[in-house]
């Protein structure tokens, strides 16, 4: 379920949609991948759910797709290393390279799964199919990550409120859907 977080204003100009996030947003596994740097390295798919909602009749979005496989929360505001020794700019820089962009009316975002060591997919797989379950393996790690997301402790993962504030700093009149 998408949850509406905040409506800041009505915006100006044509409706723009920015697709931020990790492999869930990039469309990894969906096929029909974009070509060229950095889209190809990020597994950005024409069949990603973020692009599909923008292509439906009656949904007047111009989608800028900057999600990337392997992205962590920090990659919204910092560059990300992709294939080989290549680096791509932060997702928010790609989305709004000249600073705050009032034409961005909608932002969709999935992020955080890769903040867990090994990625959320590996955690789920181990928990569901692993020989000994996952409670003992991830017991110390998951609560610590949640503490960082809430901002209760400092760490490598930015608190969720800082992540959302960063998004709104580049898309000040956007509806943000997480």
Image: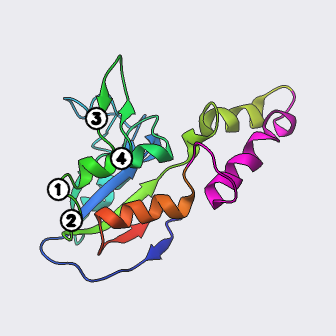
Q: Earlier in the sequence, mark 4 or mark 1?
A: 4
- Extent of the magenta region: 132-157
* Residue highlighted by disc 1: 98
Of the two numbered discs 3 and 2 in the rendering, the one whose residue sits closer to the viewer: 2
Compared to residue 1, the image places residue 36 above or below, namely above
| Labelled pair 3, 2 in contact (Cβ < 8 Å) | no
Q: Residues within 10 Å of mark 1 (few under 14, many from 20)?
A: few
Q: Nearer the viewer, residue 25 or 89?
A: 89
Q: SS of the residue at dot 3?
A: loop
Q: CA distance from mark 4 to mark 2?
A: 24 Å
Residue, disc 4: 48
Work out whether residue 73 or residue 63 is closer to the camera in this orientation and state it: 73
Circles 1 and 3, Cβ within 8 Å, touching? The answer is no
Foreground label between 4 and 2: 2
Mark 2 sits on what residue?
101
Q: Is residue 90 magenta?
A: no
Seen in the picture, residue 110 relative to 123 is either above or below; the reply is below
Circles 1, 2 touching at the beta carbon (< 8 Å): yes
Q: Quote the CA–CA distance across marks 1 and 2.
A: 8 Å
Q: How many marks?
A: 4
Residue 134 position in % (x across, y down): 81, 36
Percent of width and height locating residue 34: 24, 35
Q: Work out how far the residue at label 3 is from the one at label 2, CA to CA, in angstroms.
A: 29 Å
Q: Nearer the viewer, mark 1 or mark 3?
A: 1
Q: Tell me the element at label 2.
A: loop
Q: Give the alpha-carbon distance from disc 3 to disc 4, as whole Å.
A: 9 Å
């Amino acid at each position: 379920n998408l949850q509406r977080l905040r409506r800041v204003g009505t915006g100006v100009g044509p409706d723009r949609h920015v697709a931020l996030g990790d492999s869930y947003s990039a469309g990894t596994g969906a096929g029909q991948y974009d070509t060229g740097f950095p889209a190809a390295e990020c597994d950005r798919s024409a069949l990603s759910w973020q692009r599909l909602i923008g292509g439906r009749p009656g949904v007047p979005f111009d989608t800028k797709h900057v999600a990337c496989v392997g992205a962590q929360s920090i990659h919204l505001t910092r560059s990300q290393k992709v294939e080989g020794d290549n680096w791509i700019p932060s997702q928010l820089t790609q989305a709004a390279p000249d600073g705050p962009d009032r034409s961005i009316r909608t932002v969709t975002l999935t992020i955080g799964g890769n903040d867990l060591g090994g990625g959320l997919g590996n955690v789920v797989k181990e928990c569901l199919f692993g020989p000994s379950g996952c409670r003992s393996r991830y017991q110390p790690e998951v609560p610590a990550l949640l503490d960082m997301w809430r901002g209760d402790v400092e760490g490598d993962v930015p608190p969720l409120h800082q992540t959302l504030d960063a998004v709104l700093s580049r898309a000040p009149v956007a509806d943000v859907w997480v």
